Amino acid sequence: MSELPNALSVREADHPVEPLFLQRWSPRAMSGEALAEDQLMQLFEAARWAPSTYNEQEWRFLYARRDTPHWDAFFHLLAEPNQGWCGDAAVLGVVLSKKTFTRNGKPNPVHTFDAGLAYQNLALQGAAMGLVVHGMAGFDFDKARKELNVPEDFAVEAMFAVGRHGDPADLPEELREREEPSGRKPVGEIICEGPFAF
């Protein structure tokens, strides 16, 4: 089995940042090996400590481990191209966010933002542990709501796959060449002091 490419040998920050930010990327090749319970809980523990508006902690994570009764329901939510590589994941998850504030029932305009922060914590923890964590929008959102009994006051945000790194040669041919850390736009292309001027 080939080794996971070292993102630090491919990526270089324009300004000093913690190496973990460069280490985190979204591979697809996974081995199919299970994660230990404590490893899975480490990921969710990291997500738990994300910041949120009024400390609402409005994110929720639904998940299924491979070779368990819930696996098929999660796997069949995925778009066909994602099924081609997610079959070797150890865990599939769905990220939800509560659309209203628990404190007063009013709409929470940043529920999606806060859920994204929690997912990012999970993804960074996975990178620190040497795991593959890959987020996805390629799934049936409506079917996820129905099949997983998601109440209407929760938004279905994204899915993700987690596993141990596998051999990229086992991926569908069109994905093999993409199995390397990608670069990023220069900071100057994503920031603007003052009004919008991109």
Image (cartoon, rainbow, N blue to C red):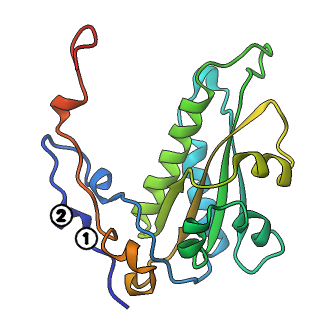
Residue sticking out furthest to the top: 195
Give the vertical position of 138 relative to 184 (above or below).
below
Q: Which label belongs to residue 110?
A: none
Which one is nearer the viewer's eye here, 27 or 140? 140
Q: Residue at x 24, y 47 (%)?
A: 184
Q: Which quadrant: the N terminus?
A: bottom left
Q: Residue at x 22, y 14 (%)?
A: 197
- Identify the residue position indicated by label 2 in the image: 10
Residue 84 falls in image quadrant: bottom right
Which one is nearer the viewer's eye here, 79 or 40? 79
All told, the count of numbered labels is: 2
What's under tag 2, amino acid-wise?
Val
- Identify the residue position indicated by label 1 in the image: 6
Q: Residue at x 62, y 28 (%)?
A: 111
Q: Is residue 123 left or right of residue 54?
A: left
Q: Position of residue 95 (x, y in %)?
A: 65, 47
Q: Is residue 28 left or right of residue 40?
A: left
Q: Is residue 101 left or right of residue 121?
A: right
Q: Position of residue 146 (x, y in %)?
A: 85, 48
**Residues tagged 1 and 2 counted as in contact (Cβ below 8 A):** yes
Q: Position of residue 20 (x, y in %)?
A: 32, 55
Give the vertical position of 61 relative to 194 (above or below).
below
